[in-house]
Amino acid sequence: MVTYNTGKVVIISVTDGFLAKSLMGKLEAEHIRAEFSRADIREIKSHIEEMELVVLFMSEELAAMPETLVYLKDLIQDKQPGVILIGEEDQYNAFTKLIPEESVTQWFRRPLDIDKLSKTIRDFISANSGENRRKTVLIVDDDITYMHTVYEWLRDHYRVGMAANGVQAISYLAKNKADLVLLDYEMPIVNGPQVYSMLKSESETGEIPVMFLTGHSDRESVMSAVDLKPVDYLLKTIDKPTLLKKLSDFFEKG
């Protein structure tokens, strides 16, 4: 049995045709972890754990499967894997109306150059494995506008998840690994300290580092946050370069 130290490639197609089978064979020969899934929501769900890259064979049949397309859109936004699209220009244009074009790692037109595609996959997996693996940061904040601002700041450097409250955060972490949580201190109903306590009480999430985000800089508010012993606390007035440096310094120390 081969042991892999990398995330896996999930190849998705309406049918397991010649090209998909050929690609699977090439990747297996190069000891790249790969799994095939038909474009069926239930089947795709069974392959998403540890997914690092999606290779999607676009087709007219897939274009006529709106539920699957919406699921793929949500999956890519949630898991943020690399995405390689294979198909014609009109298919590419249609799919990139669903997901941001910047989420697409590369697009291959037909006729497909299998050797070039397998090299692209090999290079991507090599660049995103081990120490090169992009860290995952979960932002938890009920201020949707602020959360999306931070998301845009971080998305080019990290995988970024978003949760608008503690329940969503717990749900996200039940399905995804995170290397850091940026947690709003002042949320309604279930506030930051309560969410922090929930995370620390569970074995699956207890070791995840947490940085508090706070809009208050007075000594009492700061000390209340510090007393909980997060790895850091950040004022919401922080700018993009300072935040990126804070996170970079944190991960380098880790």
Image (cartoon, grey):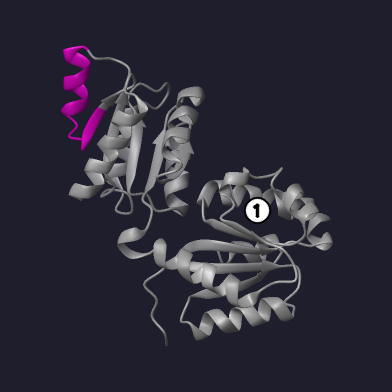
Q: Residue at x 41, y 38 (%)?
A: 154
Image x and y of residue 153, in percent:
43, 33
Image vertical order of residue 75 relative to residue 49, above or below: above
Image vertical order of residue 63 relative to residue 146, above or below: below
Q: Amino acid at mark 1?
A: Leu
Image x and y of residue 49, in percent:
49, 63
Image vertical order of residue 200 relative to residue 211, above or below: below
Q: Residue at x 51, y 86 (%)?
A: 29
Image x and y of residue 2, in percent:
41, 84
Instruction: Report whether 102 appears left or right of 219.
Output: right
Instruction: Report whether 134 appears left or right of 93.
Output: left
Of 122 and 3, nearer the camera is 122
Query: Which residue is identified by label 1?
Result: 72
Q: Count the marks: how many?
A: 1
**Quadrant in the picture for the N terminus:** bottom left
Q: Residues within 10 Å of mark 1 (few under 14, many from 20)?
A: some
Is residue 24 visible in this depiction of the protein? yes
Of 107 and 129, nearer the camera is 107
Is residue 7 visible in this depiction of the protein? no
Q: Residue at x 19, y 22 (%)?
A: 224
Q: Magenta segment range? A: 218-233
> Disc 1 on helix, strand or loop?
helix
Image x and y of residue 62, in percent:
78, 60
Residue that sits furthest to the top in the current view:
218
Image vertical order of residue 4 relative to residue 164, above or below: below
Q: Residue at x 40, y 45 (%)?
A: 157
Query: Toward which corner of the image does residue 3 lie, by quadrant?
Result: bottom left
Is residue 243 in the magenta section?
A: no
